[in-house]
Image (cartoon, rainbow, N blue to C red):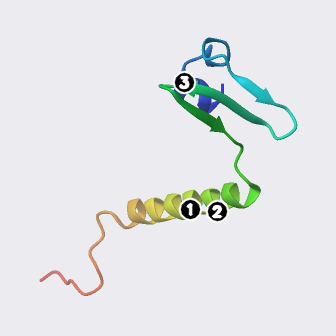
Amino acid sequence: MEATHLLLGRPWKFDKHTLHDRHTNKFSFHFHGKKITLAPRSYQEINRDLNKMKEKREKEKEKKKNKGKLPPSVTCP
């Protein structure tokens, strides 16, 4: 299953009279009177997003790890 199936509905390729350009791997269709073109993302965009997701997961993991611990500046009497 691809993200486009979730966004546009499963038989979107056939219901929207979609054109697929196999050379550029772009899909084009008309939606509410506007031409929509779906293009694949570049490797740089994918890599950037994967790095952001990795950083976010590491921050969340660190937050869970430190949850319940007192900060170093706080001491108990």
* Residue furthest front as drawn: 33
**C-alpha span from label 3 to label 2:** 25 Å
The numbered disc on residue 10 is: none
Q: 64 left or right of 13?
A: left
For mark 1, what is the residue? 52
Number of the label disc, if any, that sits on residue 48: 2
Residue type at numbered disc 2: Arg
Q: Are marks 1 and 2 in contact (CB under 8 Å)?
A: yes
Q: Which mark is residue 8?
A: 3
Instruction: Determine the residue positioned at 75% across, 56% down.
Output: 43
Q: What residue type is disc 3 on?
A: Leu
Q: Is residue 55 above or below residue 72?
A: above
Q: Secondary structure at mark 3?
A: helix
Choose between 11 and 23: the one closer to the eye: 23
Q: Quadrant of residue 75?
A: bottom left
Does 66 sit above or below residue 72? above
Q: Secondary structure at mark 2?
A: helix
Q: Earlier in the sequence, mark 3 or mark 1?
A: 3
Against 6, residue 77 (above or below) is: below
Please state which amino acid type lies under the numbered disc 1: Lys
State which quarter of the image contains the C terminus.
bottom left
Comparing 39 with 68, the one in front is 39
Q: CA distance from mark 3 to mark 1?
A: 26 Å
Density class for disc 2 (Cα within 10 Å; few <14, some 14-19, many ≥20) is few
Dot 3 or dot 2: first in sequence order is 3
Mark 1: which secondary structure? helix
Image vertical order of residue 34 relative to residue 77, above or below: above
The answer to which image quadrant residue 23 occupies is top right
The N terminus appears in which quarter of the rendering? Answer: top right
Residue in the image at 74% along x and 24% along y: 19
Residue 3 in the image: state x and y as whole percent. Answer: 60, 32
